[in-house]
Image (cartoon, rainbow, N blue to C red):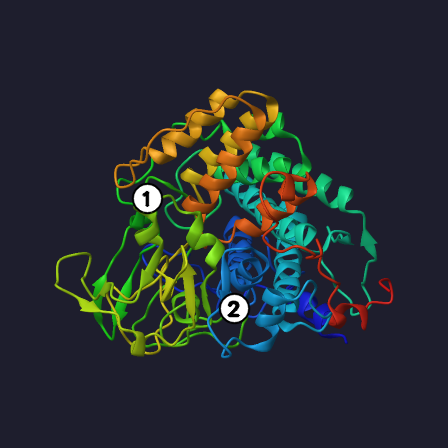
Amino acid sequence: MRRNIIIIISGVIIGTAAVIACNKRLNVFDQNNPTIDSYFKTAGELRNGVNAAYSTLRSANLVGREWFFTHDMRGGETWAGGSQLEAPRAELLKQAAPAPSNSVMTSVWTGSYQIINRTNVVITKGTDVKDDPAARDVIIGEAKFLRAWAYFELVTMWGDVPIYTEPVTTATGYKGKSPAADVYTLIISDLTDAVAKLPDIHSKDGRATKDAANFLLGKVLMQKGDYAGAKTALMQLYNKYQLTDNYLDNFDGDVKAGDALKSSGHEFNPESILEVVFVDKGDNNFNWGYNGEGATADGSIMRSQEYGKVWGNVIPSDAILDEFEAGDPRYKFTFYESGDKILTFNGTDPGLALTDDKLNVATSKHNGVAMKRIYRKYSILDWNNDDFHPDGLNQRIMRYAEALLMLAECEAEVGTPAAAAGFINEVRDRASVHMPHVTLANHDDAIKAVMHEKAVEMAGEEVNNIDMLRWRGKGYYPSMRPDPKPGQVALFPIPASETSANPMIK
């Protein structure tokens, strides 16, 4: 199969890549059809190039659809909503290892390498841009951040993978697998350079910043076991952000019906470090072409539809439901149960009760009580009850609460459990949560507290899969708590589409 390499090559001519225009969104469209040799002479043209990588990031191959499935199906916080869950997704959820032909897994592989090739163009051509050196350096910093993000996805899912640092320009330009250690070395180098180049500001348009690079660097170093280095990176964010009073402000956004705006949400709020931007044009459309491009392409996301009450593909697992302490308000902020109200318009209307006959999902059990439940995070049901409605809620890839909990884990691992408790208690002190403080005296208690708090704070946010890999590798399952998926393989097989085409990989 030559599909993956052809897709990568197509990314070289990226001037036509577009991002849906909106006040809060990334805008820049090239109306021509340039080549790599004729383009990228100015900072503006280089900006078009990195915009194409952002476009891939939010495509259906990645965050628009298959990325959240891949993470959640491999984590321990979801289960199938019923037999309607498509076979490739059910395979990821229920089997120890997927087949190399799994289409969901393959989409993430393809999208990640498309980002890599597009950022490689920007990075290699950037040295030729002289008209605006300051803008050029920021753009290269964004490209290195995005390349690091894509390689982190690949190395945590597949381990040893091909490394490309130059644009692929021929259909035979394959590379063999490099050791995971080399992939991590490239990621850390890219993020270190991105930290030096990116602006020290809060993101208001979905672009990478110095803080986003430090956040990702901290996560990468934690995965490598360098907790002291991770703490240094994450402390660069400390006290620069603040937790929103209302927990649910982190999961809403623009909701439209036709031309009517039903909600504008709280995107780019003081807790948000990086968001992948989506827009609801009110037309119920989604870019099924999977590339996220074109001047009129839809920029919506399928999350609320897939995890909602009609399609009902995904429900919370019994394990994540039982993780919540009695009285933790985050339980109701995270899940809808039969009988809960929707269409309250953020509490301003009486609303409509969810009933079993309107919830096309299997039951789940919380403390032994079987009931129909769905995820409330990233749901639009408080504003829209359509049977089909791809939405415009920005996906919060990085938020400050997770940074605090990563710092807590770093403190636990370096031997300062009291400091770990301090970071955990900051999260528990959120105005709309206000849970009792924890007191931690030793490493094991601190790690257990981190594992619990990460679960209830970040449930359904596509972070559990990476945590599980790290904790399983350190033997914390089953010594600290039961393995959520015993027997699960740590790494995916290389997609069949790659092995059948790439003579360098067997």
Residue drawn 22% across and 72% down?
259
Q: Is residue 424 above or below residue 153?
A: above
Give yes or no for contact between labels 2 and 1 (Cβ–Cβ under 8 Å).
no
Residue 336 vs residue 405: left or right? Answer: left
Q: Residues within 10 Å of mark 1 (few under 14, many from 20)?
A: some
- The residue lying toward the viewer, choosing from 429 and 56, is 429
- Identify residue type, mark 1: Asp
Residue drawn 42% across and 54% down?
321
Quarter occupied by residue 133: top right
* Mark 2 element type: loop
Residue 374 vs residue 121: left or right? Answer: left
Do we see residue 33 in this rendering?
yes
The numbered mark, 2 or 1, whose residue comes first in the sequence reads 2
**Picture disc at residue 60:** 2
* Mark 1 element type: loop
Q: CA distance from mark 2 to mark 1?
A: 34 Å
Do we see residue 42 in this rendering?
no
Q: Is residue 235 above or below residue 214?
A: above
Where residue 506 appears, as percent x and y from the top left, is 86, 65
